[in-house]
Image (spheres, rainbow, N blue to C red):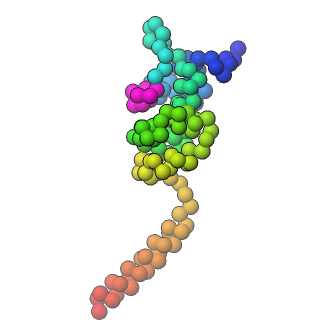
């Protein structure tokens, strides 16, 4: 029987919903102080719907957008947990998040590089001409 959208989730249910292993959720708890599932006797974790939204935002930034852990921490510090939850709920991560995290903290970005290759060729041609002028 499926749980309702407002029901608490166990770590296994949360991991399945987010498509990450359980140990990743436990690891994120050590790196992100704002991830605090409710714990019952025996240490069993229960994630509230708001926790799942935040985790979804963290997952999207780390796995889909290429952010580093430090980049997500900085985004949370500067824009808050609600921002992460909004990203997790499907809001475009680029709006606002791009301005906060420098490209180095987001990790590799795949883009069309044809313009860069052409610019590099132009620069190499210019360098060759300058080298030729310096030899004269």
> Could you say which quadrant of the image residue 10 lies in?
top right
Q: Position of residue 69 (x, y in %)?
A: 42, 38
Give the farthest residue toward the right. 1
Residue at screen point 60% across, 45% down: 92
Residue at screen point 48% across, 72% down: 119
- Is residue 73 rendered to the left or right of residue 3? left
Q: Position of residue 79 (x, y in %)?
A: 47, 40
The one nearer the camera, 88 or 13, is 88
Residue at screen point 58% across, 18% down: 9
Give the farthest residue toward the bottom. 136
Q: Is residue 23 above or below residue 69?
A: above
> In the rendered structure, does residue 86 fall within the stretch colored magenta?
no
- Is residue 136 rendered to the left or right of residue 100? left
Stretch in magenta: 27-35
- Is residue 18 rendered to the left or right of residue 43? right
- Quadrant containing the N terminus in the rendered view: top right
Numbered circles on residues, count: 0
Q: Position of residue 38 (x, y in %)?
A: 49, 16
């Amino acid at each position: 029987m499926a749980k309702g959208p407002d029901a608490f989730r166990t770590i296994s249910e949360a991991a399945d919903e987010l498509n990450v292993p359980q140990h990743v959720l436990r690891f994120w708890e050590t790196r992100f102080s704002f991830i605090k599932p409710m714990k019952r006797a025996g240490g069993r974790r229960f994630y509230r719907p708001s926790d799942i939204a935040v985790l979804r935002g963290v997952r999207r930034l780390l796995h889909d957008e290429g952010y580093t852990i430090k980049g997500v921490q900085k985004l949370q510090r500067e824009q808050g947990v609600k921002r992460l939850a909004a990203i997790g709920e499907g809001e475009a991560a680029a709006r606002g998040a791009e301005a906060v995290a420098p490209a180095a903290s987001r990790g590799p970005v795949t883009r069309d590089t044809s313009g860069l290759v052409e610019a590099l060729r132009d620069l190499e041609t210019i360098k060759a001409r300058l080298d030729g002028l310096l030899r004269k």
